[in-house]
Structures are given as C-alpha cells and as structure tokens.
Image (cartoon, helix red, strand yellow):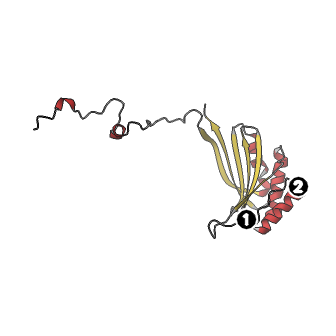
Amino acid sequence: MSKFVNFKKRSVALPPGCKDLIDLLQPHRPGKTHSISPAVGEPTIRRDESGAVRLSEIEKYVAMPFQSEAQTSNLLLSLCDNRLTVQLSKISGTMMSALALFEEDADRERRMREFFRIHHLQDPPESGQTDRFVPGVPVQVIHEISPLPMDAIAASKLVGELFRHVCRLTGDSPLTFRYYEVVTSR
C-alpha cells in the first residue's frame, strides 16, 4: 500500500445531514419534505364530484357553488361531446363568474350571440375565424356570461336556457358535470 493514504481520515459513513450520496454530491439542493399533510397555504381539493345529469336537473348542481363555504368552487356543465361547457366559479368565497366555452363554430357562435342579446347579457367580443396553430385541432371560444344572476335559481334558469337555445337541447338531454371545491390549509 502507498504510504500517502491515511486510512484514519476516510470513512464509509456520510457526513451529518446527508441521508444518501446525492445529498453529498449536491449539497446546495434543498432537502425533501416527507409530510403526509400539505404544507401551510397549499391548496387542496376538498370535494370532487362528477357524473351525468339531465338538463332538467341542473338546478341542484348550479346551487352548489352558490352554497359552498370553500374559498374556491367550480361547476362545469358540458355537452357529452364537450363542444359546449358552462363553468360557474366562486372565488375567495364571494365572486361568482360564469363562462361559456365552446368549439369554434359559426352557427353556434351566432346562436350564442343571439342568446346574449335576448337575455340582455354583455356582448362578447367578436372572435371571427381564427388562424389555427395546428390544422385540424379545434379552437375554443370563451364568452363571459355577464351579468350573472346572483341567486342559484335564476342562474340555473339562465344556464338551462343557454343549452336549450344554443344547442337545441330538451329537458331530457344528457349533460356531464364536474364539481370541485378547493381549500387552502392553515
């Protein structure tokens, strides 16, 4: 053996604070946290429901974000083919907003604008035909439904009429829904 090797200075043990070799090789890397509960202030989904519903039954679902005590709640009601979705959101426990998201289609957009005029809603901006980033991939158009009625019954009627007018649905027409609430841990 070489007389330059001092075996008293070497060890197979890692220095204090290192759990594995990568901690030794990258000491500037922040340590991992292994907590089961989320960190303080981290948003978590408290309630998450989804399923099918008939158009005539949406009142109970539209009421969910209005009645929620969560900081944020969202309800999405969609056609089964997802070509039209209405999203109702409650943010910070008070603000309600509603959006109509639909695949770009000249006839559907014409009926949507007609619906907005009939119900005295704020005119959405003109979208026109957009250039497609990827040919063959549908483009989504978003219209804010404003002013949104501030009670669940009136909002439910408005959303139901939107589906009836724009998509020519009946009360028995199927929709899908997803409702979720987000809370921030303390």
Callout 2 amino acid: His
Number of the front mark, 1 or 2: 1
**Residue at the spot 72% in from the left edge and 36% down from the top edge:** 69
Q: Is residue 5 visible?
A: yes
Q: Which residue is more in the foreground, 166 or 60?
A: 166
Label 1–label 2 contact, CB within 8 A: no
Give the residue at x 76% y 38%. 94
Residue 24: which quarter of the image? top left
Residue at the far front: name it: 4
Residue at position x 67%, y 54% in the image:
51
Judge from the rendering whether residue 41 lies leftward or rightward of residue 154; answer left or right: left
Q: Residues within 10 Å of mark 1 (few under 14, many from 20)?
A: some
Above or below, comparing residue 92 to residue 101 in the picture:
above
* Number of numbered discs: 2
Query: Which x, y percent locates residue 23?
Result: 36, 38
Find disc 2 in the rendering and name its residue: 119
Quadrant into which the C terminus falls: top right
**Quadrant occupied by the N terminus:** top left
Instruction: Assess disc 2: are there few (<14), some (14-19) or many (≥20) residues with their C-alpha within 10 Å of its C-alpha.
Output: few
Mark 1: amino acid: Glu
Residue at label 1?
104
Q: Which mark is residue 2?
A: none
Q: Nearer the viewer, residue 65 or 124?
A: 124
Query: Residue 142 occupies which quadrant of the picture?
Result: bottom right
- Mark 1 vs mark 2, CA separation in Å: 22 Å
